[in-house]
């Protein structure tokens, strides 16, 4: 099979770099186009990035010698790549307009940015959970009069630590009424330079701008349903979250307490919950998508796990690792969940979205 | 006024060292007696401790030259000091027996250890909250037939981050029904050598042995009442906690969500809560005890505070610093609280207990 | 004595904040004027700084309510303060021009910036070492036609870890021929936001732009002599340095190997060296300047000291703390030296310079 | 080819675990025997290690179910494995005796321990440098009357950061006279629990017990020659080192200044040095040993590299990565070198030694 040529928008930033590294030997996709801000345009990728290359030792050789294009001009990408990953870092409105410009040029946009997460006809995908939201893409194209282009996004990295376990329970017939969550988030989530070391030595910061709102709201869209020409949010669970920043490179941890929306005698036991989680599989697993984890949820029994440095690479950084499942004195159960914020939570999650789109035919005839 | 001579049991450990440092220039107390394990006994304090002195540059000069005594022999302390601070590190049963042995010798024990926290006639003091529990001491002495000796303890360090704010609300007429708490705790809480650096570089550990149980239970004794010859626990609030270890030297942070035990229209507004907290004062403030904070609760308005390194020294490390007070989507309100775990939460908290005891006459006639 | 009113240029940056904190209760000086970039000008200091206040809990109350002035306009400071501390953060040429502009307005400039370190008639002061360089100020004023204004600077923070020990040896008759130095420097040296946390978690960076050059050269001016209308550099020692950044908040450490410029039988023993260091005193000690350490050099004997967190506050952060003095297999002796980079190495070092200038009459008649 | 069965002594410690992980899919060797202290003996490996497994997520499945044997009884290993890796953690004399006991039983010992490093007839191998020291093994066997067993060791991890670059220069005709080295060493070098986090948060420790002596001496044995029935040390270079501990998980960094033992006009240029390094190959590369790096020395040109987290995995953790090659103001040249202390510097270095021994026939006829 010939690989599909792809572009990366915002290719010089931390998430852009991560895309380029993860796509280095991808079986389906090949990076042929890199775009960034006008001041980088016209330069070789390696010349702009080498002194601030963040991901492992080396820039992939074939990308190193690509000339960076101006990301602001969508027309430049036409004919150079079939679709683009958007890792743009600019104002929300600018990103929204720009992603639409690429789609209008017939170039699908698989986005990491938050700009289009709340656009009603844009699916916010976690492939294991809401693959059915792909149905909205046709409506999106109709609304805009786009023939081939479209926009699909992924949710914020913080809630990916617990969305699959939550979905697994709901799907198994155990709806959740409310959740209280505290996250301990890695600094890579803030990009580079990101969080100053002055704030992360002998310190934590109990605040991440905008993060709690995302965590509390995005959950409901992900669990929603396509309803006519938009995605209708789920009504539950009610989520309250506190998001903190801790001195960890990669791997967000969430401490979760949850209450089922069920009478006491219908609630699942800890054993049932564990069984639901360990047997959880979905479309990406059935389709054997290249970036899909074999086991999307991994349950650990050691009393002091999961830990970011020890567990983040589980299933190539694509699993949700859960530990400390136990009774909650206030709600029903509590547990600690961890996922790799720059793999599952960012670039590799985006790639999984693209793999799902590809396998469902959305990149045919481009 | 002549200073009262005091002893420190477990004087070579981290908490013991902290006691010795904090008592260096204390206006009322003077360390005249240091005791530790038999293998240190007979040596000069400085010779045992100098290579592992953890608290600032220098060992206080007058203590440096004291000869360490065997902590296991309570009789040795008689006549050498009026009362002792217990920072013993050994098995729970051994500590319990040993603290009783000192009390039996007529030497009051002001303890940091957890061994006697659940002894029914031993007060577990946070002076601002339950000074009235001092009344149980007389009963304790009667039970044992002790004339002068007694035992008073302090609670675990983790819950001191939010006990005063909680008490302030209850006292103001706003009882709390349930709380969900996640703590991010400093490594000094585990003593020395304590947590390996291998676990605290690019990592957090979402587990501290025994800590969650203490956090969930001790709250109820602290809020309890003297009832005949024991302290009767409070019935509320129900607490669920997750305790994590983070790479911070000093300063425990707690992310707290709470629900009032009141009808919706009787619940306090955020403004009322803040007012209650900032005006909170109690007996230690009225008595102007030397280690008492002038403001036991300090409320900050910056969106990214409190932070351990920036805020732990507030009010000499004796305040509870609160930030991010806001509505909770699931319960009523949530906030982030911080206190200095080795000052308020350990040695300086113990010293404040001793100051309260002294000012209430419990060290008279020793 | 009425306090002398002083201004702080670059008052909102990390070093500027440090000046303001350290001057809070200064016996001689009082901050009455704060200046920063035009975009901060006109605003209250507290409004600009509160969310990024880096130094302890609180902004000193009297400075919090000062209105920030435009630092680029030296005339604004006339009549508002007698002299200024320069903690400007801008291009070297701009700083040089601006510091001269203040001096031209009759306002002495005590600077932290590197812009004027190599100006031939500007003294680069470490008060214990080269107080005699004050003599050049008169020449400087003549050159420029300034009546009252002048510029005095301090050296880079990194070499302050070992300049006093080096000077002590030379002064005692043991000239040093060559030194090889590796520094492990704290992140606060890079200001705020400064070094990204991504670079300081599970990592060190073996490079600090421009630092090695400064370390190797500034030494020679500090040890130089006033020669007519300029300061003539010393010829020795030859210094080679490697400067690295490590995850430490405050406190630069230097590992130093040195060779004496003496025949083998004239070289000092380790005992002699230690004696020279522990008895080292100079003009700031004789004058009892408020910020002068009583013991400028402190020698420790524990095998694992000095350590940044344990030793940086020695003598209020103004001492050089030395440990591990031992024979070097290649040169003569080696040792580890530490000093507080934002106290001795920055703001408090600048204040000590100002105290020296004041006590020598340079602020009379302003 | 059938895999050779191997044992790991000290299998439960950090280095032992690393051996087991690295041997998981080794093409030549298979772990069939694990031994540790008597208190672990008789238990399943997984039961002893699971709560303190330090290396990645999972214990290799085939080792997890091995029963741990008593490492103190060498006879137990006979027939269970062909040779052993020694990662013993006990007193030096005990290790020496025990390693000899295994050899006496006909079981070669490839050791990580320092106990036999200075035994005159035991080779201390860095395969790229001193493969010719294998010749001493025959003498060693004669001395002891061993038929098949023998002992081979590897040097300390700290000097492996710069031994290959040093050797490359010497071999190319540029002998080195003296070196001054400062190391910044990762905490994993101290095993587990190892360095307390209290010492590694906002801190560095400028001392590692015994490390400087090893660094200064072992170099000379490695560069020595087999001379009759012992290895004669090289006379040069003279080395002076300062070893410090920094908050890094894996990857030792060394800042090296060196002087050639050559007249000024015979010294190599920086370009020549770089060429020597980048073209450096030796026996392990020629033999294509499975764990050998293709490029044993990797030179980087970014001004801020090598960095531990970014560069330690270069060539599977087996390369020496060099950066910042430049003139030294005191000696001839200086540079920064990095290697992975628990891969090249410990377990994987031991495995490379075993691969060399195997390919040279030392494991035939066992």
Image (tube, coloured by chain):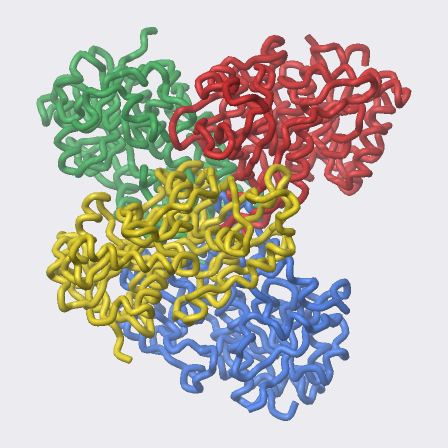
Chain colours: A green, B blue, C yellow, D red
Q: Residue at x 32, y 52 (%)?
A: A207
Q: Nearer the viewer, residue A287 or C328?
A: C328
Where does residue C208 sit, x and y in percent of width and height? 38, 39
- Count numbered badges in the picture: 0
x and y percent of residue A14 in the render?
32, 32
Side (left or right) of A178 relative to C12: right
> Along the horizontal axis of the image, is A18 left or right of D217?
left
Q: Position of residue A325 (x, y in %)?
A: 50, 46
Q: Residue at 52% across / 45% down in the picture? A: C176
Task: Judge whether residue C67 can be spotted in this image.
Answer: yes
Q: Quadrant of the N terminus of chain A?
A: top left
Q: Is residue C9 left or right of residue B324?
A: left
Vertical placement of residue D139 versus C181, above or below: above
Residue A258 in sight here: no
Q: Nearer the viewer, residue A364 or C185?
A: C185
Residue at figure coordinates x 43%, y 24% from the top left:
D300
Is residue B71 toward the left or the right of residue B328 in the image?
right
């Amino acid at each position: 099979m010939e690989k599909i040529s792809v572009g990366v928008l915002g290719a010089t930033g931390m998430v852009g770099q991560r895309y380029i590294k993860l796509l280095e030997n991808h079986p389906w996709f090949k990076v042929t186009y890199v775009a960034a801000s006008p001041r980088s345009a016209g330069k070789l990728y390696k010349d702009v990035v080498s002194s601030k290359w963040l991901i492992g030792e080396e820039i992939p050789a074939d990308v190193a010698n690509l000339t960076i294009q101006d990301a602001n001009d969508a027309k430049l990408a036409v004919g150079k790549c079939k679709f683009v990953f958007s890792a743009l870092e600019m104002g929300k409105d600018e990103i929204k307009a720009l992603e639409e410009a690429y789609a209008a040029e017939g170039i699908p946009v698989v986005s990491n940015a938050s700009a289009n997460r709340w656009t009603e006809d844009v699916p916010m995908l976690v492939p294991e959970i809401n693959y059915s939201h792909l149905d909205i893409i046709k409506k999106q194209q109709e609304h805009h009069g786009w023939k081939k282009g479209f926009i699909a996004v992924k949710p914020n990295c913080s809630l990916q630590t617990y969305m699959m376990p939550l979905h697994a329970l709901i799907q198994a017939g155990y709806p959740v009424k409310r959740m209280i969550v505290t996250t301990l988030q890695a600094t890579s989530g803030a990009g580079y330079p990101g969080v100053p070391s002055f704030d992360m030595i002998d310190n934590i910061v109990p605040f991440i701008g905008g993060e709690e709102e995302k965590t509390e709201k995005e959950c409901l869209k992900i669990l929603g349903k396509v309803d006519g020409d938009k995605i209708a949010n789920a009504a539950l669970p009610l989520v309250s979250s506190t998001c903190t920043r801790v001195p960890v490179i990669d791997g967000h941890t969430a401490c979760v307490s949850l209450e089922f929306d069920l009478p006491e005698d219908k609630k699942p036991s800890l054993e049932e919950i564990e069984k639901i989680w360990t047997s959880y599989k979905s479309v990406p697993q059935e389709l054997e998508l290249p970036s899909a984890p074999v086991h999307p949820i991994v349950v650990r029994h050691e009393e002091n796990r999961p830990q970011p440095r020890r567990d983040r690479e589980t299933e190539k950084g694509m699993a949700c690792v859960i530990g400390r499942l136990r009774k909650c004195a206030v709600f029903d159960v509590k547990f600690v969940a961890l996922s790799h914020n720059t793999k599952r939570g960012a670039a590799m999650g985006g790639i999984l979205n693209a793999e799902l789109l590809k396998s469902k035919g959305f990149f045919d005839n481009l």
